Image (cartoon, rainbow, N blue to C red):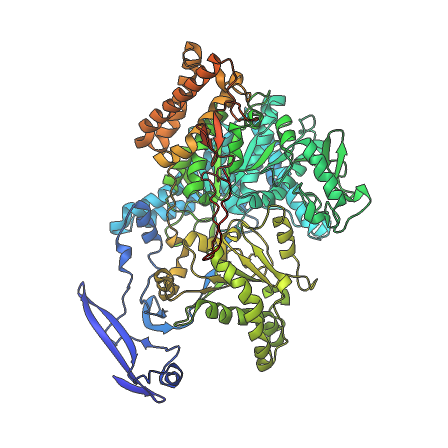
Amino acid sequence: MRLTAGDVLVEIGARWRDFRGDSLVTVHARVLTESTEDERRDIPRMLFQVRLAVTPAADAEILEYDTTRSFDTDPEAAELRLRYRNRRVYAVGHGMAADWELTEGRCTKVFLDPVPAFVVPAVETTGFDEGTAEASALELRHLERIDTDPEAVLRSLDAFVDAFAGWTARQMERAEAFGDDKAVAVRIVKRSQDAVDRMRESVDLLRTPGRQDLRTAFSLGMAAMRLQMRQKSLNEGKPEDQVTEPRWRPFQLGFLLVALASTVEETHKDRDLVDLVWFPTGGGKTEAYLGLAAIEIFRRRLVHGPAGGGTAVITRYTLRLLTSQQFQRAAALICAMERLRATDDRARGMAPFSIGLWVGNDVTPGTRAEARNALDRLRKAARPEEANEFQVESCPWCWTPLVPRLRSDKPGDYGMRPVGKDVVLHCVDETCEFADELPLAVVDEVLYDEPPTILLATVDKFARLQFKPDAGKLLGIGTTFKQPSMVIQDELHLLSGPLGTTVAVFDAVIQLLLSRSGPSPKIVASTATIRASEEQVRGLYGREVALYPPSGLDDDRTFFSRPVESGEGRLYVGLMPQSVSQPSAVIAAVTPMVELPEAIAARAPSAASRDAYWTLVMYHNSLRELGRTGALVVDDVNGRLEPRAERLGLPLRPVRAEKVLELTSRRGAEELPNDLRALRVKVDESPEAVDVVLSSNMLSVGIDIPRLALMLMVGQPKTTAEYIQATSRVGRGDTKGVVVTLFRSGRARDRSHFETFRGYHEALYRGVEPTSVTPWSLASRDRSLAGALVALIRQSFAQLAPNDAAGRLDLGNDRIREAVERLVDRFLDYVARADRPEAEETRSAVWSLLKDWDRRAALARESDEPLYYQRKKKGQAALLKEFGQSGEEWPVGDSMRSVEPNVAVEVQEPQEEVHRGEDQA
């Protein structure tokens, strides 16, 4: 069919192909007007943003297009296909996005959309009817009474579990009717049944007459969480008489009950099961596992007395920035526990509670002397906020800033003071309960001497075990305390690829060291995006995994959560300019987004505050792309804003160069806290608010700034998990986020995502890709096994721990050899559980290293010279060297990220005289 649009002649055509008895139809619009070979003169002969729609004839219907859903590559793929069976794709665009309309479940129209948009509904936690027993189970004040009125509390917990069990039974009835997919549906529901059984087991354990210690620990844990939550409300400005009673979200209480028995019972059958909390970002995962940690900490003190002190819980993060942010939240719980120790007779007499931050020494002081120097620098700094090496910005209890904005001559204005050789942190508000001392430690030396109750650490800090024997005290080695009984791994999905592979090698050592005096610790992990979790957890820990909350049979719905009924959520918009350079596309996309606050203020002032969309976050997939954007934003975007403001009648709002903030790995550790502080400044309160954030994937890993609500994704990220994590950083506050993705038409992956925009965003979590860790592969063994082996031996044998004791290894000594063999066999057992095919190769590699170590030790003893682990002076014989250094020593990394030497590249201009530099190694 031919028609004209203005002066442009257009052909509308269709191609029909037989497909399994139905027809696959391709409909196109083609411009027939001939080109003049001059681009400018051709513009009137073109059509832009064509809308092309197709409706079925009266006796026909449009069927589902996405045929790939019929292929199940693994059991999990089959489950995803079943769960998202109603999220169907009816059309795919070519160069444009396709969309469709549904009427009573039938597709009545498909059409092209040049600027597709889709609202991904927010996820809300389900609730119970007020006044019911299961609703009362969510109140922390009610749960607190379990040691004085156990029957009332246990009745409500029974009702809570019964409600979940009833939902599970109804799901199983539905699963039986799934025909060919019955086995898949039953497998999904079976996980909910397992969760119900585990919850009942925990409630029965709390009911056991002889477990008053557990009921008291549970009560104290609830009291601490309640105190912390109430204090948070007070800090937010609510009058005390208006603070609502703290309540658990149903999924949080459910998690406590699922994991409680295997956490507090050291010989429980599920002790080695990794409980993985899988919930969208901002849903309350941190509070869930902190509540479990509080119960376990109190239980240890009640059951074991002074021996239950020391480090009880190790919480690990993948990034220093994330660790510092979470430190503040966990520290508030420790402060609440300290308040109970002072006011609750059940906790009086317990050893003090404390929390420690164990991250890189370019972030926090390593020794007491370094801490004193850091305090001196802080007091001399003109802007103390920017010179705070103690990483604690405000009192975790009352939120009072611990350092002044400008330099002060009053020592009392600083929340750090010298006491003997130590630097003590305290609140500067004299009315605060922690004005004398905060239960926080950030200096490595102090952490080793006085192991904190909760240790917050980056995963790669555990590489220090191979160099620092004292670090073993954090694992209970060489102390009078019981070893840590709980390990929490946050953002599990980030432990993949090279980092996850290296971490897994050291994790085998850490698990072995943590179980040297008893059972292995309970491992709890959390994530918002995961696929193939069984393989990842087995590779990381050599353990099985249980996902919580277990999924239901419909989309992202579980008993504990569902998409909001109103459909409100984050708005995703897609742009894919054709035949336009990337810089031009970026300028064209950024300009109206910068104008958004003024446009809303002019046309719908009540819709949102100016601050809601003031700060534009520009997310980049590489630092190279980010570097190009920086100049465009200040120069070219500002060049467009002025004439547009005049034309649109809007106040001119230029992008200020000094208010363009870069948030990438290029920022120093000392700069990041200042960057986060700048991002929290609201334009309604100060003109110093940031205009534009140029970010890399650092933004996608746990940065929580509620005021951010506007994002431009410059190109589709490499993985769906990263896309979900990055875009969920906006719209976390009261304002729903807007995400505009700028696709590149020349990239096949970007093009595919644009053409299937609605189908992709309707079931985002269906598209999450599996991640992999291969810790026992040849390449990984070459990089990490030597360091892990040294950590294992040094931390297991006191006589081999000192730096000059590497020469004491003597495999010719039967006693030493037998002890080493037993240790290595236990280590290899972890390897076999994680990756059995590599177990024998790893055994050979371990004994090859041990024999080489034994040979070097024997040579050192013959020459009557010590063999050091690390060379402190030139000429000393050493076993280890850092990556990039020359010599025959074993190469090891000081961090789990430094597994390759850096390469210095010098760009040489043509005809330029070359000066040879020294070998950096």
Tell me: residue 669, above or below residue 724. above
Q: Residue lying furthest bottom in this view?
A: 7
59 to the left or right of 143: left
Q: Position of residue 271 (x, y in %)?
A: 45, 30
Q: Residue at x 59, y 34 (%)?
A: 454
Q: Residue lying furthest right in this view?
A: 410
- Which of 504 and 870 lies nearest the eye of the viewer? 870
Q: Residue lying furthest top in this view?
A: 814
**Where's the N terminus, which quadrant?**
bottom left
Tell me: residue 873, above or below residue 426. above
Q: Position of residue 529 (x, y in %)?
A: 44, 49
- Which of 398 and 862 lies nearest the eye of the viewer? 862
- Which of 513 and 645 lies nearest the eye of the viewer? 645
Q: Is residue 274 visible?
A: no
> In which image quadrant can residue 355 be found?
top right
828 to the left or right of 593: left
704 to the left or right of 583: right
Q: Is residue 584 visible?
A: yes
Circle count: 0
Q: Position of residue 311 (x, y in %)?
A: 59, 29
Q: Position of residue 80 (x, y in %)?
A: 34, 51
Q: Residue at x 46, y 61 (%)?
A: 120
Q: Residue at x 64, y 45 (%)?
A: 229
